[in-house]
Image: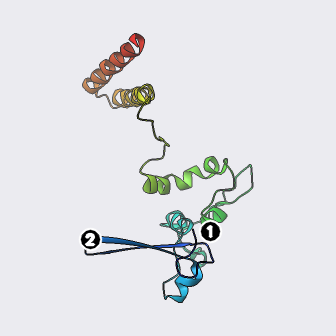
Amino acid sequence: MLCERCHKNNAAVHTVQVINGEKTEHYYCEQCAREMGMEKPISFEDIFQGFLNFGTPKQDEFANPYKRVAARCPSCGMTYDELRRTGKFGCSSCYDAFEPYITGSLKSIHGDNVHKGKVPKRNGGPLLKKHELEDLKRRLVDAIAKEEFEEAAVLRDRIKALEEDEKHE
């Protein structure tokens, strides 16, 4: 999408105004946004990088209680400091390499640390049942570990009912 103002550069800044309940959206390139007096545009990378830096000191504050994380991805060699600086993973193995340092940030961004994906409305029934069954089994193990046997019995019965339904389909 091109900038609404100059019609030359790609739009990189998206503004939304709501005045008297009426929503107006505008799209500008970074140069036009600066010329119009808008502050530096915030990108998704900036937001993600902010989450990664949440609760950690700035570069020049490493002399106090915090320790610099020396983790490195075994596949691409990216360091945790590079991930924090850029907000981007170097490869698919980076998630595993940096998992202990990013799980809290990912949970605060996405609401969970496990990707659940979307399920099609038309034929997603079996997949939804599979997810529910997996969730119930996890909850059953937790209930048993916490010695909540009444809840465990309810979960066990629900698991059996779902498994019986699968057999009859």
Seen from the viewer's position, the closer of residues 131 and 62 is 131
For the point 68% across and 60% down, the residue is 79
Q: For the C terminus, give its image quadrant.
A: top left
Residue in the foreground of this view, choosing between 14 and 52 = 14
Measured from the top left, where is residue 153 in percent x and y? 28, 20
Left or right, residue 7 beside residue 21: right
Residue 55 image offset from top left, x and y in percent: 48, 67
Compare residues 71 and 42 and report the one nearer the observer.
Answer: 42
Q: Secondary structure at mark 2?
A: loop
Mark 1 or mark 2: whose residue is earlier in sequence: 2
The residue at the point 41 percent across, 16 percent down is 166
Residue at the (27%, 27%) spot, across then down:
151
Q: Amino acid at mark 1?
A: Arg
Residue annotated with mark 2: 21
In the image, is 98 to the left or to the right of 157? right
Tell me the amino acid under the disc marked 2.
Answer: Gly
